[in-house]
Amino acid sequence: MQMGAIAQYYGYEQVVLLALQAGVDVLAMANQLQCDPDIAAKMIAIVRKLLNEGKLTPARIDESYARIVKFKERLGKFQGGRMAARASRRNRPYARSTRR
């Protein structure tokens, strides 16, 4: 998402929108060009903003969520609707912020 070829033509919010509209299920940020310790929280805020503005639909998020759960179930990481392992201490604030 921070690649020069992308950043040269698109803003961060537009990149997130285009990626999700294209069917990307997981947005990975290398965070190496401009290190930002709050990048995950900012990404969540952008997705929420796009949802509130109607540029992104809850159904699109649900599609990705369903594919991710299905993949985790195949790996044995998701059982009975819950993650088999707890979120790491560092990631807990982000995991909590995405709950419905």
Image (cartoon, rainbow, N blue to C red):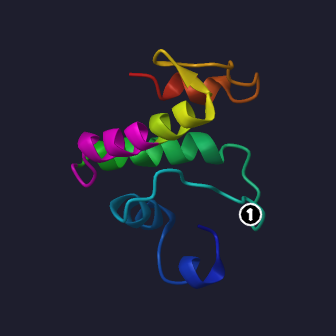
Name the residue that disc number 1 marks.
Answer: 34
Q: Is residue 10 left or right of residue 75?
A: left
Span of residues in magenta: 54-67
Residue placed most toward the observer, 70 or 50: 70
Q: Position of residue 39 (x, y in %)?
A: 64, 48
Q: Please, is residue 54 above or below residue 74 in the view?
A: below
Please tell me how crowded label 1 is: few (under 14), some (14-19), or many (20+) other residues with Cα within 10 Å: few
In the rendered structure, which amino acid carries the disc numbered 1? Answer: Gln
Quadrant housing the N terminus: bottom right
Residue 88 x, y percent position in the rendering: 74, 25
Q: Is residue 43 left or right of residue 18?
A: right
Q: Residue at coordinates 45% horizontally, 23% vertically from top-left? A: 99
Residue that appears at 29% across and 44% down? 51
- Would you place residue 48 above or below residue 7 in this image? above
- Tell me residue 67's x, y (percent): 42, 43
Residue drawn 44% across and 48% down?
A: 46
Query: Quadrant of the rendered structure where residue 18 is?
Result: bottom left
Secondary structure category for the residue under label 1: loop
Image coords of residue 41 (percent x, y): 58, 39
Magenta-colored stretch includes residue 33: no
Quick one: 73 or 59, which is closer to the camera? 73
